[in-house]
Amino acid sequence: MTGAMKIGVAGLGTVGGGLCRLIETNGSLLAQRCGRSLLVSAVSARDRRKDRGLSLEGARWYEDPVSLAKDPELDVVVELIGGSEGVAYEVVATALSAGKHVVTANKALIAHHGTALARIAEEKGVTLAYEGAVAGGIPAIKTLREGLAGNRVTRVQGILNGTCNYILTTMRETGREFGEVLDEAQKLGYAEADPSFDVDGVDAAHKLAIITALAFGCEVDFDAIQVEGIRRVSAIDIAYAEELGFRIKLLGIAQRRNGAIEQRVHPCMVPKSAPIASVEGVFNAVHAEGDFVGRIMIEGAGAGERPTASAVAADLLDIARGAQLPTFGISATALESLPTLPMAEHRGAYYLRLLVVDRPGVIADVAAALRDEDISVEAMLQRGRAPGEAVPVVIVTHETGEAQMAKALARIEALKSCLETPRMIRIEQP
Ligand SMILES: NC(=O)C1=CN([C@@H]2O[C@H](COP(=O)(O)OP(=O)(O)OC[C@H]3O[C@@H](n4cnc5c(N)ncnc54)[C@H](O)[C@@H]3O)[C@@H](O)[C@H]2O)C=CC1
Ligand SMILES: N[C@@H](CC=O)C(=O)O
Ligand code: NA
């Protein structure tokens, strides 16, 4: 056994506290697995006096986590503070520049600065690892970087935000509306106090940007992602989805087409029979397609103290074993800068829900708008009759282009008999 691996932990909140507890609980098992002990020898957090239920015996305390990152005795710095800029960025850049390995669970940081940080890590010959950043405890990064390393990945997609999946699942199970279920998710501690990163799709987009880089060997490009959250998903859409044989999920999807990358996060209707449709509650899932392996899906807890600590510990073990894994699976200097496929070039089937006046000729007007854009209808649903009054009409289309759909929707919305902006949800066949 070589000497202990000395770890500095910056951030002792949910994940940092969990990591210290994991090392306290499973320390001897980890030492057996990597041939050396993992020693938390320095820590930093905002409040030194706070009782975290951790012994942290012998660990040096740093008020300033950037000073911790410079501590010459540390082999590895674990950044568990959060945020894409400011102190978290400084901690990671400082530690890498000082030739220390870094482990982080900070998806916002990797989504915004992953390429630049990977280049520093490579120049310095150290590891930058971030398994906890994507889908918490699920080994999504290891699966893409190592397990599927023999494949050309053609598509990757996932349920990447537990809060949204919990809200959508609960809306379906209880028939309640978004706002009410969001309140409950906040009370249960799933959603952030400011839940906009979760429900507006930003958190899922951070994670998608990272797995896209890994899957396709390209630079991390958060700004290239088309993002739409779940605020506009209503109980009526969930009920119609059920009736039509679908579930609504917030998916992050990336695929390579015509030398470009399509990256999008938005609510999707997926067939109930698709494995990803049965991933419920706060669980996450990552689904990938490789040219040799075919389709695989991994599912599990995407957040929380213990699952995320489990992911951080796996990264620490790799480092302790001496594994030198390139940050995004290939040399950081070889990451391609690939063009983004505009959303207007997306092709797929669509669910449309209109609120129209129930009178003869309305459906003919709607059908004409679709016909003129060459959009073929697979199914149409109108429940009940309410002459002269508002009725919802649901349409499912065959595969068509997003640009054509946008034109048809603009024309439908302009009809006098159309009483509100039509609701459109893309249908995915995973
Ligand atoms: N909580 C979860 O389930 C998951 C969290 N993550 C990521 O892990 C990271 C940490 O998240 P949590 O543990 O939930 O956060 P947290 O808010 O529970 O803990 C943050 C810690 O950082 C410390 N901190 C903040 N500013 C500091 C400063 N200027 N100097 C020193 N310490 C400072 C706080 O005192 C606290 O100990 C974030 O990047 C988050 O996105 C990733 C996956 C799941
Ligand atoms: N807020 C996230 C948890 C961290 O990744 C989620 O709800 O999935
Ligand atoms: Na993970």
Image (cartoon, rainbow, N blue to C red):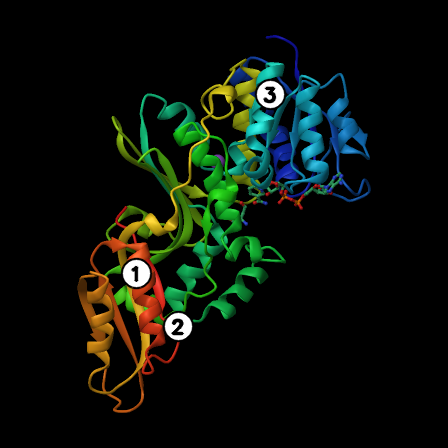
Tell me: residue 27, above or below residue 281: above
Vertical position of residue 70 compared to residue 2: above or below: below
Q: Could you tell me how far apart the alpha carbons at marks 2 and 1 are, in whole angstroms? A: 14 Å
In the rendered image, which residue does mark 1 sit on? 405
Element type where label 2 sits in the image: loop
The residue carrying mark 3 is: 121
- At which x and y percent is residue 378? 17, 63
Amino acid at dot 2? Thr
Specify whether 109 is left or right of 430: right
Question: Which is in the foreground here, disc 2 or disc 1?
Answer: 1
Q: What is the x, y in percent for residue 340?
A: 42, 40
The mark lying in front, picked from 3 and 2, is 2
User: Along the line of sight, which residue is nearer the eye, 336 or 8?
Assistant: 336
Quarter placement of the N terminus: top right
**Which element type, helix, strand or loop, lies under badge 3?**
helix
Residue 358, position as x, y percentages in the image: 26, 86
The residue carrying pointer 2 sits among few (fewer than 14), some (14 to 19) or many (20 or more) residues within 10 Å by Cα, namely: some
Q: Residue at x 29, y 63 (%)?
A: 351
Q: Residue 103 vs residue 324: left or right? A: right
Pointer 2: what residue?
421
Residue in the picture at 51% in, 24% down: 327
Please state if 91 lies on the left or on the right of 287 as rendered.
Answer: right
Q: Which quarter of the figure has residue 54? A: top right
Dot 3 crowding, Cα within 10 Å, few <14, some 14–19, many 20+ = many
Residue drawn at point x = 61 percent, y = 38 percent? 18
Please tell me which of labels 3 and 1 falls first in the chain: 3
